[in-house]
Image (spheres, rainbow, N blue to C red):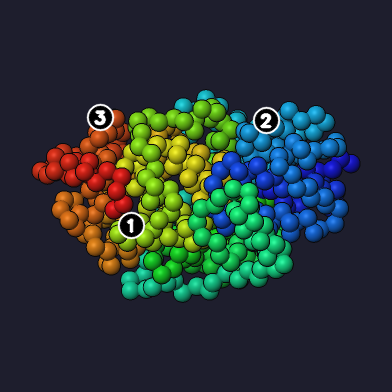
Amino acid sequence: MRRRWLFADQLGPHFLDEPGQPVLLVESKAVFRRRVFHRQKAHLVLSALRHRAREGNVRLVRAETYAQAISEPLSVCHPTSRAARGLVRRLPDVRMLPPRGFVTSPEDFAGWAHGRDHLRLEDFYRYARVRHDVLMDGAEPAGGRWNLDADNREPPPRGAGALDVPAPPEIAEDEIDERVRADLDRWEREDGITFAGRDGPRLFPATREEALARLRHFVAHRLPAFGPYEDAMLAGDPRMAHSMLSPAINLGLLDPLEVIESAERAYRTGPVPLACAEGFVRQILGWRDFIWHLYWHFEPEYRAVNELHARRELPRWFAELDAGAVRARCLSDVLAGVRDRGWVHHIPRLMVLGNYAMQRGWRPGAVADWFHRSFVDGYEWVMTANVVGMSQYADAGRMSTKPYAAGGAYINRMSDYCGGCRYDPRSRTGANACPYTAGYWSFLARHEQSFGDNHRMRRPLQGLRRLNDLDAVIEQEKARGSKAP
């Protein structure tokens, strides 16, 4: 049996053909020279690799590049980036197998996507539910409805500083983590390798045992509260009831199918409401697989699409995670979360970070690269369609029906940020003008013609045409430019 080469995002047992198969792991320093990654992301990846290397029949090679570490016949599961796939194809005597770590196969996705001009999550999700018999009662969806989104859009409980759910089990660092931290310090000191964000205790699983413990705890204690508040934000509770399992799944420590089965089993046995289970399953079976397949389905140049002609570069305060330079409470808090944890949940990503970037016209490829480098669960396949297509609407609707743009009213409704902010979400001009509210109307004005044929944008554009101070809003936002709000 050939030794199985496992990339750092293929660390679970489902990437092997049988238990005990010999394994090669490669720790490449060149990866960290090419990009400025978040310090905690680098720590998590190296810790996961080195913990996996402690298991039997595993050989860990430390090298400058992957190619330098390859010296024997190998097999490898299809990698998760085009660059890694290209490398594998160039290496002699390395056999590439079909991808693992996702639910729907490439062949099934290609069959589903064939002939469709626009690819929509909801259509794919329903197909995947039927294809894999997930949350189905015979030929019908469990509970008679495919999508319970309408039940899962509650604002945070009034007056609550945090949801009443237990925190996930803490991670206990060990001697491997100590050595990883010492090595990263040395790389910065001696090798000219730099990182973004702050160092800190490891917050996410680096072993399968840790990942399974987090999964069990989430399903038993947090999933029952997940659904209604999955889109809500609280300044004092960055986790809310989210699973925080994406780093472990994206490292390959958990098989997404076992995660989905755990959630469905909890619904079937009673303690988890259907809306919570369905909302969570949609994130894994639906969105995660959808984004993975879009990365390969779209052309390699997709990452550079820019249909809204957004040309501005990321300002330094944003690129360097300088939350202290920002006075807008929501953006400052979320940016601090990225700086301190390398993680915030999906609504701050989309509606605080991505929304602001789109309003300001930052270059979509640069925004996607920032998300890739700054988040512990960020990979090229994760962030390409997520950011370029959904968050920045740079593909003009190939994968989403409208731009995810919103003013301060949305943030005020779905969070507790606005109450303690110097800006007023109702104001669009003046010293107290909310940068999201003013930025929203300026964004719509800039792209009014482009959005004119989109029926989902009809009402926002009608509101735009009723503004009597639009010229003042536009001039004000031009003057703000790339300054920290």
Tell me the residue that label 2 is attached to: 86
For the residues carrying marks 2 and 1, which lies nearer the camera in this image?
1
Q: Residue at x 44, y 68 (%)?
A: 237
Residue 316 vs residue 456, the one in the foreground: 316
Secondary structure under the numbered disc 2 in the rendered image: helix
Q: Residue at x 67, y 51 (%)?
A: 252
Callout 1–callout 3 Cβ contact below 8 Å: no
Question: Which residue ends up furthest to the top in the rendered image?
Answer: 115
Secondary structure under the numbered disc 3 in the rendered image: helix
Q: Position of residue 253 (x, y in %)?
A: 68, 55
Q: Position of residue 120 (x, y in %)?
A: 47, 37
Q: Which circle's residue, 3 or 2, is located before the other in the chain?
A: 2
Q: Amino acid at mark 3?
A: Gln
Q: Alpha carbon of mark 1 to alpha carbon of mark 3: how far?
A: 32 Å
Q: Position of residue 187 (x, y in %)?
A: 63, 52
Tell me the residue that label 1 is attached to: 326
Q: Alpha carbon of mark 2 to alpha carbon of mark 1: how far?
A: 41 Å
